[in-house]
Image: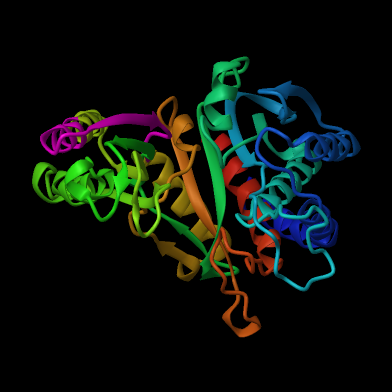
């Protein structure tokens, strides 16, 4: 395989860049929310048709799975994944390809993920004569909302017929400069659960608190009491976060309401501790409420599991990426308390989820994901599509 194919891939990534940039801009202009990616899916299918790549559509509603077969013999199958959905954010960027859909924006870079994977697909299709085995492309809906498109697609058999030996995914990283990539072996991203508490008391006039059971006071005690789950019940070496971002009580300055709602998130890196912590949340919230004369309903929506990068696959990735980009362009990542539904794949087969640098401090491209000013240095697309193609053909050859 050697040097020739690597140079060929680099040349094709450069040659296809303008087309892939246009694809990214089209997708950026036409963002769609989770499970509504109908036009996005149609656009991807049109591109796959143009590249001569066969696919199945309508998996988990809008998901697509495509297969590319190398010309040489090879049983090995490798899966690649890109997510398709956008976020309910009004775009503040003043760019020619600004979102045309009011209140919806590709603020998490999924437009770049799809464009980059289409670029990788075109490179692999063009170089089929040089490699053996099969590449499975997964275009996945609804990464941003529970239960996550990954779990739905897995449920509909995306990891069967054929069964992949491993799966790779990439995600934009504005804090890493374009031209570089980041990776962390082993535990990488946290599990995530939604916590909804409804504290029930008895409302009344704020001037006669003795005639009420004050759910605002009870809710305040619950928020403080629940902090001991992380500080006192958790082993210090399992990173854990419990945060409440919303408290709603429909009273006013002189009205104590009947109930108060608390919405929060719980994140960690152990399935055993995750289950135990859910029970602790229930016990403490209900215990505090009852001790103060009220009660508390607890609803915990289980979200994504923690994401683990397979050690062997990650070490192979580092090798291939160093070979393709140079060792100085590989960044070691810290643990992240953010979550990703790619994690579901990582509990079924060896997985490697890495970060594609998309920042450019000199050009002011520094905004974080999930913000109204998020954008990417589009040169990252050339790195993204070429590197992923090289990683795949390298992994298929061993």
Question: What colour scheme governs how the chains and residues are painted in the rendered image of this protein?
Answer: rainbow
Question: Camera-side residue: 229 or 251?
Answer: 251
Q: Position of residue 303 (x, y in %)?
A: 42, 33
Quarter in which the N terminus is drawn: top right
Query: Is 285 colored magenta in this rendering?
Result: yes
Question: Camera-side residue: 141 or 282?
Answer: 282
Residue for point 62% across, 66% down: 374
Work out whether 6 lies above or below 40. Answer: below
Work out whether 81 lies above or below 54. Answer: below
Seen in the image, is 119 located left or right of residue 241? right
Seen in the image, is 273 located left or right of residue 54? left
Residue for point 55% across, 30% down: 150
Does residue 47 appear in the picture of this structure?
Answer: yes
Work out whether 164 lies above or below 193. Answer: above
Seen in the image, is 46 located left or right of residue 205? right
Seen in the image, is 25 located left or right of residue 259? right
Q: Position of residue 322 (x, y in %)?
A: 49, 60
Query: Is 292 colored magenta in this rendering?
Result: yes
Question: Camera-side residue: 132 or 387?
Answer: 387
Q: Position of residue 72 (x, y in %)?
A: 70, 28
Q: Position of residue 46 (x, y in %)?
A: 88, 37
Numbered range of the magenta stretch:
283-307
């Amino acid at each position: 395989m050697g040097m020739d194919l690597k140079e060929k891939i680099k040349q094709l990534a450069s040659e296809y860049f303008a087309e892939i940039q246009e694809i990214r801009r089209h997708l950026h202009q036409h963002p769609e929310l989770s499970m509504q990616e109908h036009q996005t899916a149609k656009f991807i299918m049109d591109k796959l048709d143009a590249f001569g790549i066969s696919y199945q559509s309508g998996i988990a509603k809008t998901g697509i799975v495509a297969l590319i077969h190398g010309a040489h013999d090879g049983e090995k199958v490798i899966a690649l994944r890109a997510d398709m959905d956008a976020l309910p954010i009004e775009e503040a960027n003043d760019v020619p390809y600004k979102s045309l859909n009011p209140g919806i924006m590709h603020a998490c870079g999924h437009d770049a993920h799809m464009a980059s994977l289409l670029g990788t697909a075109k490179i692999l299709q063009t170089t089929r004569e040089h490699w053996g085995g099969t590449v499975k492309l997964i275009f996945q809906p609804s990464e941003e909302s529970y239960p996550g498109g990954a779990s739905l697609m897995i449920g509909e058999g995306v990891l069967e017929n054929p069964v992949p030996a491993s799966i790779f995914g990439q995600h934009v990283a504005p804090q890493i400069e374009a031209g570089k990539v980041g990776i962390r072996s082993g535990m990488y991203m946290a599990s995530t659960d939604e916590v909804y508490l409804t504290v029930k008391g008895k409302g009344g006039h704020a001037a006669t608190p003795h005639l009420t059971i004050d759910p605002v006071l009870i809710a305040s005690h619950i928020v403080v009491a629940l902090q001991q789950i992380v500080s006192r019940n958790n082993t210090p070496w399992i990173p854990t976060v419990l945060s409440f971002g919303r408290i709603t009580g429909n009273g006013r300055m002189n009205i104590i309401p009947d109930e108060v709602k608390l919405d929060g998130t719980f994140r960690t890196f152990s399935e055993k501790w995750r289950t135990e912590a859910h029970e602790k949340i229930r016990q403490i919230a209900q215990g505090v409420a009852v001790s103060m004369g009220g009660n508390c309903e607890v609803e915990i929506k289980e979200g994504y599991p923690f994401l683990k990068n397979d050690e062997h696959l990650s070490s192979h990735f580092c090798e291939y990426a160093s070979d393709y980009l140079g060792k100085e362009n590989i960044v070691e990542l810290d643990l992240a308390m953010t979550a990703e539904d790619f994690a579901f794949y990582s509990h079924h087969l060896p997985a490697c989820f890495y970060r594609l640098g998309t920042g450019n401090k000199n050009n002011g491209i520094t905004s974080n994901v999930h913000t109204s000013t998020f954008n990417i240095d589009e040169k990252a697309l050339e790195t993204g599509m070429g590197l992923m193609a090289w990683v795949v053909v390298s992994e298929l050859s061993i």
